Image (tube, rainbow, N blue to C red):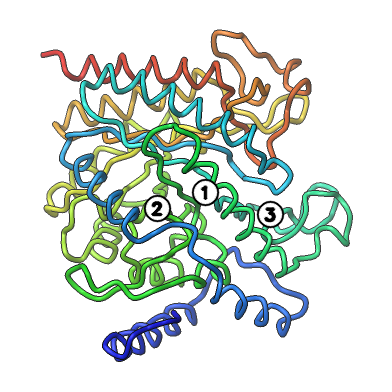
Amino acid sequence: MSRLSQRTYPVARRLAEQLTAALALPAAQQPHWPDPVRARAVAGLLHHARPIVTRDETARLHDRLATVARGEAFLLQGGDCAETFADNTESHLRANLRVLQRMGEVLGRAAGRPVVTVARMAGQYAKPRSRAVDALGLPAYRGDSVNSAEPTPAARRPDPHRMLRAHANAAVAMDVVRGAGAGEVYVSHEMLLLDYERAVLSVDTSGPEPRLSSGLAHFLWIGERTRQLGGAHVAFAELLSNPIGLKIGPDVTPEQAVEYVRRLDPHGTPGRLTLVSRMGHTLVRELLPPIVEKVSASGHEVVWQCDPMHGNTRTSANGYKTRHFDHVLGELAGFFEVHRRLGTHPGGIHVEVAGEDVTECLGGAGGITETDLPARYRTACDPRLNAEQSVELAHTVAELLCARERP
């Protein structure tokens, strides 16, 4: 929070105190920097970095998400599971933007309403991990902003300088987004690495109460592994004016969901909060309805979004982390069924996709099998739908949208 006017200084000081208190809470999935002094020095440099996005852009997305919450638009969010510095090329970024554009065109025709496109791009450089050590006994790869995927002890050593590289790469990616001619596209990433997320904050007094505006992304989401109600990630998100997403998995109770909504959307602002269900295709029809009912009864107009990827991940017989296309579609079908039955709006989808012909997810019209996985398995972390599977998925969601519109 730099370059503040005298008029905003008292507000900034109060928000800075609240930020310090939030970040003092337990924070899951954070790296242990070997040299804390160096980490603090890097954090200081990041505080003076230029914003990746503008506040006007973020405010415009907030307005767009309000229309999604009211059932007047549909949200398409997607991109790489984990961005890498090596793949931060114009060709890769444009390929991902093209596949999102094609998906959006299919969905827009079916929905008969605008599609709001949010890319997992220009900042998705940190990843939570279920295990601190990988199968080789090395510290887990936690995304390019923390360490390298190269399987050596030196490469896996957390290096805070990589946060500066992440910011520089994000700025390059955002320039491509703005110049790609792919329509109105916003950028998002998981709000995970708090030493990075606390940088490039400014005071925003345009809402019901003063908050901090992140200049690192238009939209930030809290992941399944960092959504502790007593933790730093939720407390930090409470201070932000940016639209916030929250992943909710099978362990979330309806009561917890309402508490998340109460804390993250205290003023009942449509589009402020997106609840991203990731239940798995076998559980969504059972577990999602009571959550939707309880939150709807609270009166908050949230965006209901489905992540059909993470609840359907498994390991193939030949050792690859993968997802089956049919299971992804199964969760989407269940998500739409739940909302149709309850009379609520299925607001969008959140998917991991690649614009290239990768072989990471099974099935689809191309009939990818387990023996095909090694051919073009290129993800840095979780498996992505390839371009053909992504457009095929969009056509299926289009059918679900049309079915919902029919009496």
Q: Nearer the viewer, residue 148 or 222?
A: 148
| Side of 21 relative to 59 (left or right) | right
Name the residue carrying label 3: 131
Amino acid type, callout 3: Arg
* Image quarter hosting the C terminus: top left
Task: Locate residue 93: give its quadrant.
Answer: top right
Q: Is residue 281 above or below residue 278?
A: above
The x and y percentages for residue 81 are 58, 41
- Mark 1–mark 2 distance (CA, rounded to whole Å): 13 Å
Task: Locate residue 133: give its quadrant.
Answer: bottom right
- Mark 3–mark 2 distance (CA, rounded to whole Å): 27 Å
- Which of the marked residues, 3 or 2, is nearer the chain's N terminus? 3
Name the residue carrying label 1: 174
* Image quarter hosting the N terminus: bottom left
Which of discs 1 and 2 lies nearer the camera? The answer is 1
Image mark for residue 219: 2
- Mark 3–mark 1 distance (CA, rounded to whole Å): 31 Å
